[in-house]
Amino acid sequence: MAVIPSRQRRRPGKSMANVRHARIPAMFPVSRGASMLGCLRGIAAGGGTGAVLTGNLLKHLLISCEQLEEDDFRSLPKASLARRLLAGLYDWLLVIAVLMVASVPFVAGTGEPVAAGNNLYRSFLAFIIVGFFCGFWYWGGQTVGMRAWRLRVVGVTRLQLSPAQALRRFGWACIGALALGAGYWWMLFDPAGCSWHDRMSGTRVVQLPKPQH
C-alpha cells in the first residue's frame, strides 16, 4: 500500500512575507483629511491581512493619517477677533453658571455667604476655571463657545495641544485680558492674526467650514 506523505507544515514567516508585499493603498482607501479613526476602520475592513498588521507598520499608518488631518486644519483661515470674543462670552456665561452650582456645598451647611478670605474656596473656583478651558483645549481643541461659532484651537507643530501648551495659553490669556485687553487687540496688528496667548503657547485659532448637509 502506498504511503501518502503528510502535508508539509507552513512556515510561520510565510504569511508575514505576503503581508510585507501586500498593496497597502488598496487596503486603506484613505482620502486627504481622513482621521486616525478612519485608519483603524480600514484595518478592520482588511480582514485576515489587516489582523496581522502590528508594530511599526501600524504606527506608520496612524502617523500618516494624523498628518493628513493636521495639514487640512493648518490650511483653514484664521478666526476673526469678533468671533473669538463672542465665543469667549458664551464660555464665561457657562463658567459662571458652573461656579454658582459648585458653590452650593460651601453655603449649604451654614446658609451664609462664603467669606472673602476663604483660600480653599478661591482655590476651588480657580481649579474649575482652569480645568474648564485647559480641559476643552486639550481634549478636542474646542470649548462650548468655540463649538457654537465653529472655532478650533490647534498647535503650530501638531494638531492637538499638549497640557503645557494649554496651561501657557490660559496664563497668557489672563495676562492679555488684565492688560486692558491688549493681548486680544494685538490680533489686529499681528501679521498672522495671533493674540498674545496664541504666540506664547505656539497655537492658533482657525475657522471651521460650515457642515455640509
Image (cartoon, rainbow, N blue to C red):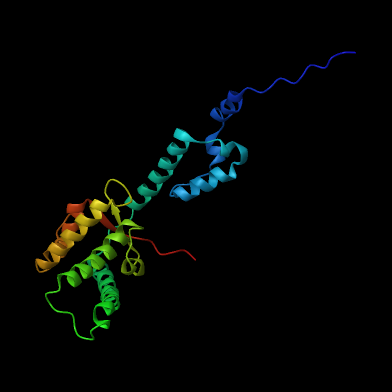
**Is 96 drawn above or below residue 184 in the view shown?**
below
**Is 108 drawn above or below residue 6 in the view shown?**
below
Q: Furthest-front residue in view?
A: 109
Q: Furthest-bottom residue in view?
A: 111
**Is 35 drawn above or below residue 134 in the view shown?**
above
Q: Residue 136: percent from the left, percent from the top?
A: 32, 61
The answer, for residue 193, to whether it is visible in the render is no
Classify residue 52 as left or right of residue 210.
Answer: right
Q: Residue 47: percent from the left, percent from the top?
A: 61, 41
**Is 75 drawn above or below residue 211 in the view shown?**
above
For image coordinates 35% across by 57% down, the residue present is 139
For image coordinates 71% across by 20% down, the residue present is 8
Name the foreground residue: 91 vs 152. Answer: 91
Name the foreground residue: 124 vs 198. Answer: 124
Specify the quadrant of the image occupied by residue 130.
bottom left
For image coordinates 55% across by 33% down, the residue present is 23
For image coordinates 47% across by 38% down, the residue present is 58
Classify residue 48 as left or right of residue 28.
Answer: right
The answer, for residue 23, to whether it is visible in the render is yes
Classify residue 54 as left or right of residue 149.
Answer: right
Classify residue 9 as left or right of residue 132.
Answer: right
Specify the quadrant of the image occupied by residue 146.
bottom left
| Quarter of the picture holding the N terminus | top right
Name the foreground residue: 204 vs 5. Answer: 5
